Every structure is written in structure tokens, then in C-alpha cells.
Image: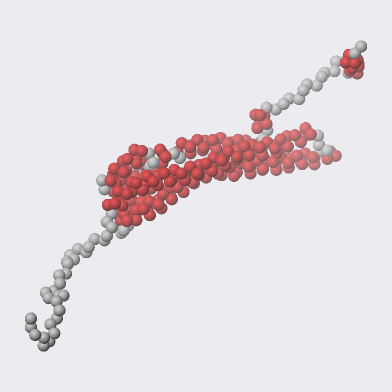
Amino acid sequence: MTTSVQLALSFAAVQPAGAAVDPPPETKSLLDHILSGGPIGYTIIGLSFVLVGLIIFHLIQIRESKLAPGDVVGELDGLLESGDVKGALAYCRNPANDCFLTRMFASALARCSRSPFGFLELRSALEEAGQEQVARLYRAVDAIGLIAAVAPMLGLLGTVVGMVSAFETISTTEGGFARPDELAGSISIALITTVLGLIVAIPATAVFSFLRNRIDSLASSVADLTEDISAHLESASPNKAPSKPGAQTRRPAPGAGQPTPVKGAPAP
């Protein structure tokens, strides 16, 4: 009789009759691991959905066709080329034409119309208005940066909560020795929340940096369009101050510029 048969017979003899064989342990799915994060894990999952919505929204809005639409650029360029400043200001203030470019020109034209220097300070007014609009776009994407900062902190909070729960289980166990299955739930929360926080924070940080660079690039492109459009008003602005009304050109008095005759000199 072979050795394998002998081992099988000996095992059958040792095992009691009717004893059930223990089933293999069930393995958790990815969804089970995610849901084991507890309330803090659910909060991080909720932030991930908010993050996806914000990313889609800003990728649609932060484009040159949204910041400076072609029809708005053409209409505004035509109004300023014809010298219709009031019409251009009304066009920019119309809510139907609201965009990055019209908000910038509305602020600059309103400032120049109130200034005693007129359109001589148009360039500085446009620069200040452009900086304000760029800062507005930065504030819009700050929510993504906030999620990138808060998500790992929530993961760390879940880690601390899970470890505290594990130590409480050990302290309440008789003799101070807890079985692994009694600590598994707390340790799972401690590890899963950290993983979830990093999974949300890493892409959020990358997208936040990408959108900031995209804003800078698009702001530079819109600045070039603004310079071309504002050239109509700058070329029409006088370079010299007008003369005072009623001023007349003084004529030289008769004999001015002629030498004064010396007394006693012979007449010519």
C-alpha cells in the first residue's frame, strides 16, 4: 500500500464520524471594504462625489469659449471701433452677455467714464479689472483645494477613532487579551478611512493644480484679445491736452525784433 493511501486511512480513523469540515473563510469584496469605513468613510465617499461634480463643472466653464465667446468679442470690437462707448458699456452690463471679458470691460469702461483722465487710463483700468476676474476664478476652484486638504485629515481622524476603539476593546477584555476577530472591526476602520482619504486627496490635488495653471493660461489669452479691442479707444484718445477756449495767438508788436536806434547816430 502506498504512503498516500496510508495517510488517508489514518486521517479517516482519527477524524470522528459525522464531523463537518469547516468552510473556507469568506473574502470581502471591494465594496465591503469601502463600506467598512463607518460614518467617517461615508463622509469621505460623499466628498468624492462632490469632487467629481466640481471637476466636471470647472472643466466645462474654464474654457476660452466661455471666458471670451467669439460672438461677444466681435460685437464688442465693432462697438468700440465705431466709438460707441455707451453702447459697449450697456452691452457688457447685459446679463445675457455675462462672461469674463464683458465683466472686465464693464468695470474698466465705467471707471474711465467717471475719471477726469478719460480713456488715458484705460489700460490700467483693464489690468485691475482683469486681476479681479482672475482672482474670482481662483476662488471658484478653491473648493477642490479644500477637499484635497480635508480628505486625508478625515482619513487620519478615522484612523485615530479606529485605534481608540481597538484599545477600548482590549481594556474591557478579561485578562487584557483580545482575540483578533474582536479587534478586526476597529482596525478595519483605522485602515480603510486612511486609504479612502488618500484616494480622494491625490486626484483632487492634481486637478486643483491643473485648473490653476489653466486659468493663468486662459487669462493670458484673454489679455491679448483685450489689448486688440482696447486699441480702438487708445488710438482715438488725444495725445495732447486741448487748448483753452478763447485763447488767441499773440502777434509781435510793430517794430518788435528791430534794433533800437542809438541816440546821436546818423539817420539811414
| Residue at 56% in and 35% down | 49
Q: Quadrant of residue 239?
A: bottom left
Left or right for 16, reference 160: right
Give 56 or 70, whichever is nearer the viewer: 70
Give 44 or 38, whichever is nearer the viewer: 44
| Residue at 77% in and 23% down | 24
Q: Position of residue 117 (x, y in %)?
A: 31, 58
Height in image: 134 above or below 27?
below
Height in image: 33 above or below 253?
above
Residue 151 is at least partly visible in this image = yes
Q: Position of residue 72 (x, y in %)?
A: 34, 40
Q: Quadrant of residue 75?
A: top left
* Position of the N terminus by quadrant: top right
Height in image: 127 above or below 214?
below
Residue 43 is at least partly visible in this image = no
Look at the image and name its color scheme: secondary structure
Left or right for 115, reference 17: left
* Position of the C terminus by quadrant: bottom left
Residue at the farthest bottom position: 264
Q: Position of residue 21 (x, y in %)?
A: 82, 19
Left or right for 259, reference 14: left
Give 81 or 99, whichever is nearer the viewer: 81
Give 43 or 263, whichever is nearer the viewer: 263
